[in-house]
Image: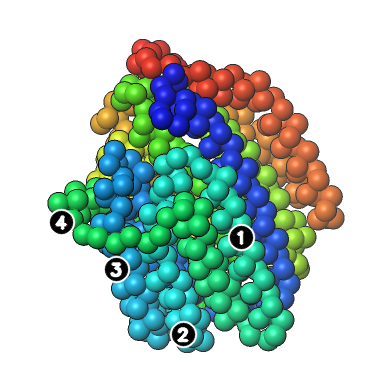
Amino acid sequence: MTATTSDGPVAGRVSRGLGWSLGGTIAMRVGSVLFGILVARLVAPAEFGVYAVALTVWTILSTLADLGLGADLVRAPDMESRAPTVASIGLGVSVSLGATMALAAEPIALAFGSPESVGVIRLMAVSIAVFGFTIVPAARLTRAYRQGALFGINGLGLLASAVVAITLILGGLGAEALAWGQIACQSLIAVGLFVVTRTRPRLGFDPVLARDSLAFSLPLAAANLLSWLLLSIDNLIVSRTLGPEQLGLYVLAFNISSWPMSALGAAIRVVALPAFSQASSPQVRNRGLVLCIAPLVTVATLVSLGLAAAAVPVVTLVYGERWEPAAAALAGLAVFGGIRVVLDLMATFLIAAGETRAVLAVQVAWMLAMVPAMIVGVAGWGLAGAGWTHVAVVVAVVVPLYLRALAKIGIRSGDLLRPATVPLLAVVPAAVVCVWLGDLASNRFLTLLLVAAAVLVLYALPLLPWWRARFTLLRRLEPKPLPEGDPS
């Protein structure tokens, strides 16, 4: 793109932002994985299951605490005039949610069949209240593509969490130690954001701006809440059907499967939202999404294939033999993790286009399909059923609905599906060979090496020239409408 802003060419800022975002997210993911490995070695599955109950509730409420206000600030042309009003709304919501979580800790724990989680839930409620302070300064950095600064702040937060949690675990505190680590992390991030942006909390309230902001944010907040409920309702079903210890195993598998989402989806989202929002025209914005699909599907499929095929050696070699049952869920969850990366880009695009109601409609349909399917899947096939139920629902229900929503704003389904055909067809022979190798070798380290080699030789290397060509097209995006033929 040739467009510029007061801070320089948009294309250059997007490129630098994406580089920092991707590199920083990968580094954060590696740090989180190393922290998780250490925790898994120090904490028993049953104890981790107690923390997983609190983490499930925290994840849902922390998503609702944002209320979509951060996205509204990123895309709004008048951010500074809206900031005090948004800060007041966000802080009020987060404090209210934190208080509600603390007061409802006992019935929540009983609903999960884990009365031991009451104290941990109350501790985690503190970090929900702190979250409200982060909305405005985080939006400032995102809007300016300052992903390097965000990486540094989040890195310090992770370090604080690890130091506090591990110190308390070694002191014999157990699951509560992980909750104190989360409080330390959120508090340091809040302080760091204000230091880096050289601002201080500024509250105010303009009824007109509040109504305008909430008209955009509330559907997005509801969609985000449903999205995380979708990713948490399985925890409730697994816990009530199979017990807290099996929930600990399942949460570990889900965390591993989220590596693609954490490394790719989160990194791309924070850059894609301002980039799509600042596109010079709807035609340029639409073409940008079309050109993103092929490279993203290729990378997401690559990571998902490796994780699914090497589920047992990854779990046992990294976390220890006692966590091996988690591999049953990981195979299906790894495939789901790759699909989530692509779905998240589609949702981010719709948000940038102002179509928050369409995103909400998809989440509602997703929830209605997921709950009965998950109950049947877990009851019939245990942890493995939970993992593959996610895949079945997104393929049968969610993907078609997102394609329909995008078609309404000018992006034809064929324009998105045709570029994805090559990487999806290429994965079939590679997957067959990986499954065969997994059954062939009894040594787990050898299995991991063989699967990695097969993914590299049969999938990554043959597709590399094709992938680079599509990525080059994306970087050279010009302000012109979509072609009539295949843009790939």
SS for callout 1:
helix
Marks 3 and 2 in Cβ contact (< 8 Å)? no
Instruction: Using the rendered view, name the quadrant where residue 456 is placed.
Output: top right
Marks 4 and 2 in Cβ contact (< 8 Å)? no
Q: Which of marks 3 and 2 is in front?
A: 3
Please state the horizontal and vertical placement of residue 208, each as a whole percent of the image.
Answer: 14, 51
- Does label 4 or label 3 sit earlier along the sequence? 3
Q: Residue tagged by mark 4?
A: 207
SS for callout 4:
helix
Q: Residue tagged by mark 3?
A: 92
- Does label 3 or label 2 sit earlier along the sequence? 3
Q: Which of marks 4 and 2 is in front?
A: 4
User: Foreground: 399 or 354?
Assistant: 354
Q: Count neighbours of disc 3 (C-alpha within 10 A) and say few if under 14, some if 14 to 19, many if 20 or more.
A: some
Q: Count neighbours of disc 4 (C-alpha within 10 A) and say few if under 14, some if 14 to 19, many if 20 or more.
A: few
- Does label 4 or label 1 sit earlier along the sequence? 1
Please state the horizontal and vertical placement of residue 227, each as a whole percent of the image.
Answer: 38, 55
Say if 75 sits above or below 439 in the image: above
Q: Residue tagged by mark 1?
A: 156
| Separation (CA) of disc 3 from disc 2 | 24 Å
Disc number for residue 118: 2
| Separation (CA) of disc 3 from disc 1 | 26 Å
